[in-house]
Amino acid sequence: MGFLKSFFREVRYYPSAIVGLLIIFGLVVLATYAVIAIPYHRAIDLWRGSGNIWYRNPKNAPPKWVNYFRDKKLPETIDLDSRKQGVAQRKEKPLGKGKQIELTFHFNYTADEFPHDMVIYFYPTYKAKPPFVTGEWITPDGRKIRLGNFAVTNGFSFWLNQDKKLRSRIQRIFEREGIPAQIALLLDPDSLPKDPNVAVEKVARPLKGKYTIKLKFLTFEPDSDVNAEYIAYGGVYGLAGTDHLRRDLMVGLLWGAPVALAFGLISALVIGIATMIIAAVGVWYGGIVDDLIQRITEINMVLPFLPILIMVGIFVSRSLWMIMLVTIALSIFGAGIKSYRAMFLQLRESPYIEAAQAYGAGDTRIIFLYLIPRILPMLIPGFISAVPSFVFLEASLAVLGIGDPVLPTWGKIIQDAQSNAALYKGLYYWILEPSVLLMVTGLGFALLGFALDRIFNPRLRQE
Amino acid sequence: MSRFARYLAVKVVLLFITTVIGVYITILVANMGGYVDKLRMAQLREEIGMKIMRDPSLRDVPIEQKKEMIETKIRLEEERLGLDKPFFIRSLYFLKDAMTLNLGRAQYMVSDSGSRQVKAIILERLPATLLLMGTSFFIIFFLNLFVGLALSRRYGSFIDKLYVASAPLSAAPAWFYGIFLILIFAAWLGVLPFGGMVDAPKPPTAWLYALNVAKHMVLPLAAMLLSSHFIGVYGNRTFFLIYSSEDYVDLARAKGLPDRMLERRYILRPTLPTIVTNFLLSVITLWMGAIIFETVFNWPGNGRLYYQAIGLKDVPVIVGNTIIYAYLLAISVFSLDIIYAFLDPRVRVGGGQH
């Protein structure tokens, strides 16, 4: 306890240490929140996208806050599901064996850019004969555009931009070829460029105001029913954006924190302690044991560490814990042994060790109770400084494509972004978000580690 | 001189043992799923099958008999190569093959010259890797040394404090800064290429070619500097400061020696061996980093080869590349050991070791 008190008294004088401590504290809070808010199995399910959870999200959409930096605001996703209360107006009247159902959706369009895509998902119930639908689109200035009419089978979805009939209808209305449906339907006709060589997407503005979608269904069976969901995939999503699989990056960013912390802290701690014990054993027994440990250390330092880790990742297991185990096994005879050895060599000559030997203390007792506890505080700066290297090691492996197969990590997000040429396509948020988190984590531990090093190493403090 | 030779001989033996151990671990790991065995068997089967099926003197032999011949031949060959022996003995055969770079044939990858030999594929990429890593080692070492020296002269100045404050930046590896640099200079400003070693239509003259390669090297070098410069300078500067407070330096200063000479003879001389040793550690880290580094920058070297081979699951190339890395590491360490031996008088003259 006294040690902790003096530690905090010292740390006060190092602003970088305080910043580092705050960052680490923030990360621990973030990691705790992630694990509580999204339990482990839920996180894995979300990241795998099992059960088609993400179909409502736009693809490759930057986070919402990018709109603060833009003059032309990107639209958010519009999702109107008639199965939810109060979203759509529903009128029904019996007709023959079945009934006539009319679903009306209203939405207000206020963004300055067009959505990426539009789709209507249908959820019909029927035995043999599927319901039939006629769709109509009404713009704020009262123009009516027929969307089409078709039978609604199970799992049917109507992608507006891919419908040939709708496309030719649009071509007739605007007397131009190749305007995507999601643009044509929201287009302000006055902003249509006169020159046919100017691309519509670059000049045209959306007409702001209240839009209406009318879907008229005919069902042909007594129990037959139908629901519909209209989605206009926006240009922005959530606080973190989405990736190429429509996943919410927030899940990966949140879960990256506990994974990075666990990997970094456990590896650094186990390696630090093991290295210290090996150094103490070497110094205490001396002779062949010491020589052997020194030679093993020298050999171990020149082993192709990362290639071996890659091989393990490919041939044995890509699991994070397996990688951690191998990392620890290959690092316990690390460079740290040399510096600990120097400290132990000094300590071995202390009078209290001689006294311990004189009253008959055993070797194990001397090593574990008298030698190691004395320099245990020296472990802390090294331990803290080592954490970033392990955090980045995990990220490095993930970038190479051998990240953990199921867990979402920051490195895996970077790898996804890299392999989808995010920088080339201008999807900067995708790479920047996990990178900034990695950088902040690395800096937090490095800042604290450097300050602690100066506190514990008086030789560096003099200057 | 004999002492010098003995020192180097010990180092060579030690590094050779290290390489052997590294390669052996690689074989052990690779064979955990039986991959190496399977590969050797498949290769054998293909070779013998081809030979017998294509042998013109056996043209009239019926197909069943040919198949029988193939089977007996494979069994004989297995015995000859020791493939029927227990794993420990087999692993020693593999070790011998690996150490002599007899790396077999790639499963999917082909070298630019059209060869399926792993050795050819790997050696083809080696110059690119050596060019990038060699240049960066050279620049980083001397820049760290001279900036460290300059800072120790200006101890406590603003720039000195800036370097000390920037030292934690080295927590991130070079590839990580690479992503940021590509974002800024290639994607955003568009002044430097995204990656690669040379533009797609090769520049016609050797001069333009070299210039083009240099342009592609700017970002990788900058990334490498960002991640290892500040910590390196910080370390060097601290050493210089510690050594410049030694009594013999004070004495020399009192004698009235000029500062430059003081630095060269009394500060740089005794610190250099330690600085070389520290640099050796960072060289090891940089080599490891090269794998991801080249991937990020699309540099056509052995690091990116790893990435491609991992993507294709081309086992012989991965194993072969690991062996090359073991060699490269050992060679780098050995060359630094030679420099160390030149610098440290204890190695040349003797005494003071224990």
Image (tube, helix red, strand yellow):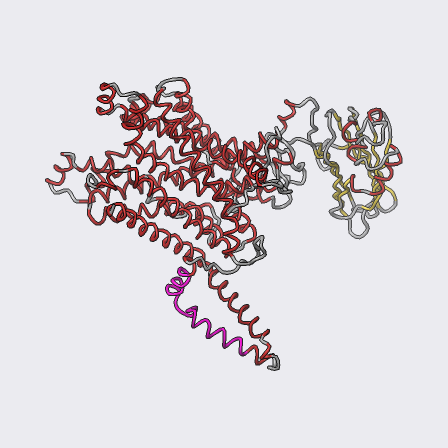
Residue B55 location (% of width, % of height): 58, 75
| x then y, percent, for residue B173 | 46, 36
The residue nearer to you, when weighing A141 against A293, is A293
* Left or right: where A88 falls relative to A244: right
Q: Can you give x and y, in whole percent of width and height, for residue A251 in the image?
A: 56, 36
Residue sticking out furthest to the left: A358
Vertical relation: B349 (above or below) A20: below
Is residue B19 rendered magenta in the image?
A: no
Q: Depth check: A37 or A209 in front?
A: A209
> Is residue A1 at least partly visible in the picture?
no
When the figure is inspected, residue B240 is found, relative to residue B306, above or below; the finding is above
Q: Quadrant of the N terminus of chain B?
A: top left
Image-based side of A279 in relation to A79, left or right: left
Which quarter of the picture shows residue A451? top left
From the viewer's side, name the closer residue of A410 and B190. B190
* Left or right of A302, for residue A416: right
Picture coordinates of residue A415, whole percent (x, y): 55, 41
Pick whichever, B88 or B215, lies toward us.
B215
Q: Locate the C terminus of chain B and report the quarter of the image it occupies.
A: top left
Q: Is residue A230 above or below residue A194?
A: below
| Image mark count | 0
Residue at (25% x, 38% y) in the render: B345
The residue shown at (33%, 43%) is B338
Q: Main secondary structure of the magenta part?
A: helix
- Magenta-drawn stretch contains B82: yes
Residue A278 in sight: yes
Q: Which residues are magenta?
A: B68-96
